[in-house]
Amino acid sequence: MRLPNSARNCFITLTLFACLIPAPSSGQVLPAATPASVGVSGERLNRLSATLQQYVDQGRTAGLVTIVMRQGKVVHLEAFGKRDIEAGAPMQKDTIFRIASMSKAITSLATMILLEEGKLLLNDPVSKFIPSFAKTTVMVPPPTGAVAGTPVSVFPAKRPITIRDLLTHTAGIGYGAGPAEPLYKAANVHMWYFADKTEPIATTIDRLAALPFDAQPGERYVYGFNTDILGVVVEKASGMSLDEFLKTRIFQPLKMADTHFYLPVEKRNRLAAVYSIVDGKLVRAPNEGTGQGAYVEGPRQNFSGGAGLLSTASDYARFLQMLVNGGELDGVRVLSPKTVELMTSSHTGTLFNEGRTGFGLGFEVIEHLGRAGVPGSVGLFSWGGAYHTDFWADPTEQVVAVLMEQLLPSGGSDLHGKFRALVYQAIVAPVK
């Protein structure tokens, strides 16, 4: 029997919605819309899908999940390639990924929740919550031309490190590279991976406080352990573990059912495998360390607010949509609009990215489109993770975009730039 045109159109629309939304196992379903209904060209979105598939076909990534929302509606949610090549497991829309430094925005949000509750201020010294930070030091490398092996000089910090310094990565605290690297390795506080540690994060951070930092507070942008320290501040100010605080104050209210520090065992078959680009070829990363990591079988004791979370594309899109909405999603208010405005404004002057873009309280922000030199709008905020995940949100265009893959190292992949350009070229009408 041939259906009338109206019935066929209805069937096609319902089928499109079914393709856009994730399976019920991945938590709260996001509302979907036809691209044209929110000013997006479906034909132009096909360029995005074709390009993402091309990266898989060319062996430049094992697999991807991408989501694009406009005006709070999903217009693109697709999975490409394999979740696990060796197992022959296809990538699924509800696949779970290690999001590494995309954790930072979530921990920064937790800090702002406590600000709204009167439990901390941005200019509070970190030592108010972590006494070991009362007196910190800064290392000064040997002068150029010094004899090899000349020790670094260490001086007291000029002022206390503040909560704002941590949120903006201007505390002078790196990831333990540079002249003092042997000291960091000896203290077992080196680089961003914490999942295999058999101690609470607060114990790790107390050891960090005794090490010399890279710059004086407020004088340089130095990317490093700042948000892990913030995680301990959240624990001390709230009286809860970071895991419990994020779960009860962010993940449950926002229905982010698949976001965890350590993966529940029953979800292990949804975790994407990690791959690397080595000599231009895609190879499976090792099991240990930052390869596959200890996110399932590990000790589950150390909650890294800077790089420890796992999530899905849809869960993270819910988090971003809440911020784009001014702190509210599905009738649940997490922050006030003014606090979101504070988070998404630059606090770093020219310290970050030579002033081409700014840095807010947890992520990069665009202040001037020409200086930024990338597609977007003033007010766009973004960041990514070590496993080559990426997000950005544009409140002006009411766009949220998330790209999830597991590629470390990424071999200089240009996929993030292509992703953003191909999303923006599909926007053909202003927000209604």
Image (cartoon, rainbow, N blue to C red):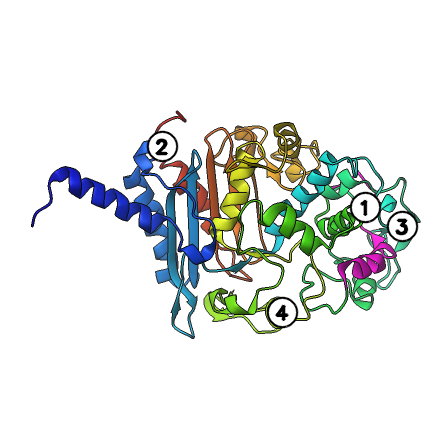
Frontmost of labels 1 and 2 is: 2
- Indicate which label's residue lies in the foreground, 1 or 3: 3
The amino acid beneath tag 3 is Pro
Q: Residue at x 43, y 75 (%)?
A: 86
Q: Amino acid at mark 2?
A: Val
Task: Give, as a three-letter code, the residue at label 1.
Answer: Ala
The residue drawn where x is 85% and y is 41% is: 125
- Label 3 belongs to which residue? 131
Which residues lie in the magenta part?
200-220
* Discs 1/4, front: 4
Residue at 45% across / 67% down in the picture?
281
Residue type for callout 4: Ala
Residue at the spot of label 4 = 294
If you read the primary sequence from the N terminus, does the residue marked by circle 2 or circle 4 appear first?
Answer: 2
Q: Is residue 145 above or below residue 83?
A: above
Q: Which residue is mark 2?
A: 38
Count of marks overlaid on the render = 4
Q: Determine the residue positioned at 32% across, 46% down.
A: 17
